[in-house]
């Protein structure tokens, strides 16, 4: 590999970074709006349904699905439904957690997800982590314990919902990684919203339409915009840069969540939450750094072997 190609690999386009930051600002808007609606008395199931319904409409428009429907063809519809079930479970549990916890608390626990994915990737995907990454996973789990502090009267139902949301989302991400080899990117984005919307539709017969004012309805309609545009920004970012290069930027959401909680709900995380969040973020960044070094080393080995073979020809 030439020096120029290496430097190109190590350079992350500014546009990709901006797309990534924009995505997590939009996700912050989504969580902040959802917390506002939950506190206003709207059921989390209905909020989730509106979020996915708006997402379906927006994605269909952004990708112009009527021009080339083949891009949305599913290789395994069953896998899409199961994957959508985990995403809907994660979304509903997250909204339930937001009823009891601050925005920064739910986000801190959510950030333990990449470490759980690293642990589950071994038995589920055959991607086993080494001892250094396992130490980072344990450190991240210690950060979760610092935030929840079980046994000292802090751990509550909100933390249970936040942990369930994180676990369900981690399984959703692992399924996405497995399905990406056979499914188109458009189908993964589209069915990730369509499947939950269909699965949650029967619940509307029990929950009904909420009795809220025009402003709350306006916020409900914006949920799909925040979610759909956020995922679209992620797609644009990953088209221009590698997953490893962009891995640190989701942690910027912690800043936006703290600001939103302070400005909108007059809530600021306590010292324990900030310390736990710092531990989780540091552990996650170390895993990103370690996986990047392993990829670079493996690529160097492959290049060296190819050079030896070429000299023999």
Image (spheres, rainbow, N blue to C red):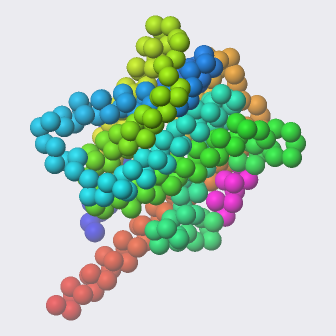
The extreme front residue here reads: 205
At which x and y percent is residue 310? Answer: 21, 85
Q: Is residue 68 left or right of residue 245?
A: left
- Viewer-nearest residue: 201 or 260: 201
At x 49%, y 48%, the residue is 86
Front residue (pair 58, 136): 58
Q: Quadrant of residue 160?
A: top right
Q: Residue at x 26, y 53 (%)?
A: 74
Magenta stretch in the rendered image: 135-143
The furthest residue to the right: 152
Judge whether 5 appears above or below 144 on screen. Answer: below
Q: Position of residue 216 (x, y in %)?
A: 50, 13
Residue 49: percent from left, percent from top: 45, 31
Does 286 lie within the magenta span? no
Residue 210 in picture, x, y percent from top left? 52, 17
Camera-nearest residue between 312 and 207: 207
Q: Nearer the viewer, residue 173 or 37?
A: 37
Q: Would you say residue 140 sits in the magenta stretch? A: yes
């Amino acid at each position: 590999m030439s020096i120029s190609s290496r430097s190109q690999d190590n350079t992350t386009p500014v546009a990709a970074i901006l797309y990534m930051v924009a995505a997590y600002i939009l996700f912050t808007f989504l969580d902040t709006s959802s917390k506002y609606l939950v506190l206003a008395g709207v059921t989390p199931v209905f909020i989730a349904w509106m979020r996915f319904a708006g997402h379906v409409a927006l994605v269909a428009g952004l990708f112009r699905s009527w021009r080339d429907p083949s891009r949305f063809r599913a290789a395994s519809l069953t896998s899409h439904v199961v994957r959508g079930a985990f995403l809907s479970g994660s979304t509903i549990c997250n909204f339930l957690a937001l009823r009891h916890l601050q925005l920064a608390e739910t986000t801190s626990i959510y950030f333990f997800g990449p470490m759980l994915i690293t642990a589950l990737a071994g038995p589920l995907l055959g991607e086993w982590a080494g001892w250094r990454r396992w130490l980072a996973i344990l450190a991240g789990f210690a950060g979760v314990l610092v935030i929840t502090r079980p046994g000292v009267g802090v751990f509550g139902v909100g933390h249970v919902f936040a942990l369930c949301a994180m676990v369900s989302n981690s399984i959703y991400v692992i399924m996405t990684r497995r399905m990406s080899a056979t499914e188109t990117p458009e189908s993964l984005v589209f069915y990730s919203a369509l499947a939950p919307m269909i699965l949650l539709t029967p619940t509307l017969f029990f929950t009904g339409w909420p009795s809220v004012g025009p402003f709350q309805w306006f916020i409900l309609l914006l949920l799909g915009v925040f979610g759909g545009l956020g995922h679209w920004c992620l797609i644009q970012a990953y088209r221009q840069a590698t997953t490893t290069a962009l891995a640190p930027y989701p942690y910027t959401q912690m800043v936006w969540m703290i600001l939103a909680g302070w400005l909108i709900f007059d809530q600021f995380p306590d010292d324990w939450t900030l310390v736990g969040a710092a531990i989780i973020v540091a552990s996650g960044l170390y895993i990103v750094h370690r996986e990047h070094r392993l990829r670079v080393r493996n690529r160097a080995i492959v290049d060296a072997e190819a050079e030896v073979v070429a000299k023999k020809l």
